[in-house]
Image (spheres, coloured by chain):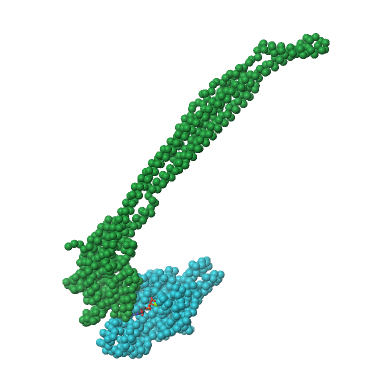
Chain colours: A green, B cyan
Amino acid sequence: MTAPPWLELLDDTIRACAAHARPDLAQRLRRQRARLLDPALHILVIGESGQGKSQLINALVNAPVCPVGDDLTTTVPTFVRHAESPGATLVLDPAALTPRTATGALPALRRVPVPIDEIPRQVGRRSGAHRDAELVSAEIGIPRKLLAAGLVLIDTPASGHPHTRPAVDSLAALDQADAVLLVSDATHELSDTELTLLRRVAATCPNILVVLSKIDLSPRWRQVAERNRARLDSNGLPVTLVPASATLRLEATRTGDAALNQESGFPNLIGLLHQEMTGKPDVLARRSVAVVGGSALAQLVVTLREQQAASDSSPASAALADRGDVQRAIDELRRRSTRWQTMLADDMADLVSDVEHDMRDRTRKILREVDRVFDDADPVLSWDAFEDWLAEHLADAADTNFAWLVERSRWIADRLAQYFPGRPGGETSAARLVFPEDLTGGVGALERPRLERFTAGQKAFTALRNSYGGVLMFGLITSLAGMPLLNAISLGAGAAFGGKGIKDEADSRLKRRQAAAKAAAQRHVDDFFLAVSKDSRDTIRRVQRTLRDHFTALAEELQQALVEAATEARRAALTEAAQQERRQRQAQQGVAELVALHQRVQSLAGQQAAPQHHGSLEISA
Amino acid sequence: MTLDEAVWGALNEAAALYRGNPRATNWLGHQLERFAEPVRIAVAGQQKSGKSTLVNAIVGEQIAPIELSDGTQVPTWYRDGAPPRASLVTRNGAAQDVPVDRVDRRLRIDLRSWPPPQVERISVDWPSRALRGATLIDTPACPPSAAERLAREADAVLYLTRHLHGTDTQSLESLQHPPLASAGPVNAILVLSHADELGASRIDALSAAKRVARRYRADVQVSPLCQNVVAVAGLLAHTARTLREHEFGALSALAGTPRAALDGALLSADRFAGTDFPAAVSQEIRQELLNRFGVFGVRLAVTLIRTGCHNQAALTAELVQRSGLAELRESIGQCFTERREVLKARSALLALEDVLRMEPHPGAARLTAHLERVLASAHEFRELRLTAALQCGRTTLPDGLDLEAQRLLGAAGTGVHARLGVAEAATGSELRQLAVDVVDRWRVQAENPLFTARQRQAAATVVRSCEGMVARLVAERG
Ligand SMILES: Nc1nc2c(ncn2[C@@H]2O[C@H](COP(=O)(O)OP(=O)(O)OP(=O)(O)O)[C@@H](O)[C@H]2O)c(=O)[nH]1
Ligand SMILES: Nc1nc2c(ncn2[C@@H]2O[C@H](COP(=O)(O)OP(=O)(O)OP(=O)(O)O)[C@@H](O)[C@H]2O)c(=O)[nH]1
Ligand SMILES: [Mg+2]
Ligand SMILES: [Mg+2]
């Protein structure tokens, strides 16, 4: 025998739940599977208090097995099933009253057989509670044709009543139910709380009948039935509503009144139950799977879609972001390299003029000093000392100037390095500059000027020349006075004139020597300046070249790295996009598979579709 | 100073404090008016719990419900007043008179020209003795969340339910107002409505319903939420009070039919209204009887006529008695109208708190605190609190003393006779003697060394109640 299609679909659904990491759902579906394969049909009778649930069961089996009362009566779920001979069992839970034993083990449930007519007293509200254990459910066996085929009726405590313990709330037993009868009496229309209950039930168990009970009491039950049907429809609950009266049914079986039996609505109700019974392996199971499988799949799809949405909205992927960064870095590098090159050129030009100016300034100061010295001193006497002094001062000036050049070059190198932040090469670049040890190497020694001395002959000559003039001039004057040309006065004057002539001659000679010394020093300093500034220029040019080469290399290196990174990023982005696409395709495929499965599962319900619930609507959209 | 005077004084003082504030002054003005009015009782409950029917039953006339043009209801206030008059209060607070009319013995108000969303509430003046002691508010079904507002507008609440549901206990819980929670359930009666259906319309349905009510009264979950639980068949009560001659005639005709023949026809509503009927009562009338009495009402009325109610007045009286309406009216008297002072004081305190919340003012805060102290120490409140504590077992007294204590505290009525548990016929001197004896007995209990401090305190409160009685009796003689 091949498995029915609903079973295959249910198994597929269970597998899907397991595959999508929802063992909880899978577990629940497995329980449902076991229940659906069980030939017995479990019918859960639920409703609010005093609606006639217990009496309905009594009327169905025509025996007062369930307690009936005006106030809250039924306290625990009561299972009514077929048995060869009448009997009842109480199921007691000792753990409820004796909190866990020291070992933590829970004592097992205890089953106590009782006479069937004890049940109403035990299950009813004022039951003589068992002192050491709590009653959790009751089971009743009774020989009835209706039950023989495997029908199990489950009476439940009232839902919503403040005295109903949550643990025994009818919804707790919902997983075990193949079908649900909601009992609501005909003296009122379905209340909001009953509708809420129905909606909750429909999400788990699609096979619902609403029994409109106590129709014997309500003159308006037909209107109520109509209004209820309309209300159920408008709430998306297309369930069958069956009017019935347990009182009339019991009276009819007592008196054998067929017309009354018909009026009780029970033949209709039993017919529907039979239909469910025979339809269980097919219609009912299909409807159940449609709902429980459908809702499980809907949950899976929703989770999957949420995950998908989350990954879609996450920032366009790291690789892509990287790629953008790299491109920006390259652009930036380009912008910078023009900037640092202009800066290097400008700075170097500035440096040349600054260094030259500085050197000129220093040499000028030296020359002024030279002038001052040779204004008084006689170069003949002090030349050697002067030579040393000048050489020392020039060397000093050149050194200082050179040190300044070095410093400025370093500073420029540092400034350039700022264009390459984070590059270790940037900072060390200045250190790599190579400077010559000595700049003044190219200048020759100070040339000694030709200095004329005032010899004794030259002195005598000068004295003679001057005294002759004096004799002559005074002789002429005195001769006018009658004296001879050579007289005492003119000779005296000649002597005086001769002495002065010698002195004058010596002075002018010193001056000439001094001028010559100054000129020599001037020439020397000029030469020195030219040599030094040429050296400086050369050095600066060298520095500029070094710097340019260094930073160009650095920039190239950087650019190279960036280009590589860009390529890498592009490659990563491509692979990531491919991966994402693959993932997305997989997810979409997963969703599509689930949706397809969902549709197949839903189609199990056939035309008279199971009650719609949120999940199904959302995911078929 | 009585409680009344204290509250009146506090309200006036508050009005003086807020003189410059039109909003608060207006609100306090309403409260002063409200203080002088009869107790306001809201009739509340879930949909179709029988609220409007119960209002009709209490008033004895068909005045509820009043439906808007779309069939919905708004809170409708019924006050004593002649001539009949109705005014409609719109959402923006404006009041507008609307014409009233009596058609086919029922109140009709033409609201067709009023768009339902605009109407906030309707206020009806209706000449009725039943409304003299209390204003009734017929409310539309409200969710538990709206119950608190109800508790502020009304001084007391009749809460109706057919079968107790979690939503009902929730609503009742939100009626308990926190500041006075310690005062216990001072202002609610739980009504098990449709009592005939609660007992499945069996002929003993009403006694079954009364048994259920008694059980809830002692229930630990329910008793802290209300002062009393009463089962009432509102439809039956209303029909009985408005019984018409031809109805009595038809019922008598039914009673005259052989029992065996009629029983089959009374098996179900369908059979009773069917074409094949053993008695000479037209189908139309039978249908009308069903609508007016319900299946149970017809069964009961027929049985009563058969067993001795041979005239309309006797039938009316018996039906009203059995319907539970008499018990309800009595309970309303004991719990609400006789305790008007306490209920009004409670409402005034809530109102002062409201005004304080809306418009904070240091003087008013002091005033509220003062009033709260006055209330908490008022003997009337102590009585209520102790009664509640005894009823729900928070305080226990041995040997049936607790039942006597409850009676003396006024749980069964605040009149001297009810407190002492003697017949109305008892004379002044008998009462005085009895009261003095009781005081002496309870004085001993108040010093009983075997009691806990709490029990001695309870006994002292009882002594204080008895002393009050003695003082009243002595004053009456003098
Ligand atoms: N007239 C009439 N009364 C009914 C019918 N079914 C039940 N009743 C009465 O309704 C009341 C409540 O019936 P139960 O069967 O105890 O109701 P339940 O829903 O099981 O109540 P809980 O166990 O308390 O939740 C009892 O008094 C029954 O006699 C009916 O069909 N017709
Ligand atoms: N059998 C029976 N029927 C009643 C009783 N009280 C009210 N009804 C019926 O119950 C229905 C609703 O009664 P209402 O009084 O309109 O109830 P309500 O609570 O005012 O309803 P809403 O205002 O619509 O929530 C009507 O058909 C009444 O005839 C009662 O005590 N017994
Ligand atoms: Mg039951
Ligand atoms: Mg109403």
Q: Is residue B441 visible?
A: no
Q: Is residue B298 visible?
A: yes
Q: Which image quadrant is residue B228 in?
A: bottom left
Decide which of B17, A197 is in the foreground and name it: A197
Q: Which image quadrant is residue A44 in?
A: bottom left
Decide which of B370, A161 is in the foreground and name it: A161
Name the residue rendered at 49%, 76% in the picture: B95
Compared to A606, does A55 lie above or below?
below
Name the residue rendered at 26%, 65% in the picture: A604
Name the residue rendered at 45%, 34% in the picture: A549
Compared to A403, does A614 lie above or below?
below
Q: Which image quadrant is residue A211 in?
A: bottom left
Give how far across and how far down residue B245 sits, in percent: 37, 89
Give how far across and how far down residue A427 sits, in percent: 46, 36
Taking the view exactly as shown, the residue that stands out farthest to the right is: A482
Give how far across and how far down residue A567 sits, in percent: 38, 43
Side (left or right) of B99 relative to A574: right
Name the residue rendered at 28%, 75% in the picture: A242
Give how far across and how far down residue B130 sits, in percent: 43, 82
Decide which of B31, A362 is in the foreground and name it: A362
Which quarter of the frame holds ligand 4? bottom left
The N terminus of chain A lies in quadrant: bottom left
Side (left or right) of B400 relative to A281: right
Marks counted in the figure total 0
Compared to A201, does B302 lie above or below?
below
The C terminus of chain A lies in quadrant: bottom left
Decide which of A524, B93 is in the foreground and name it: A524
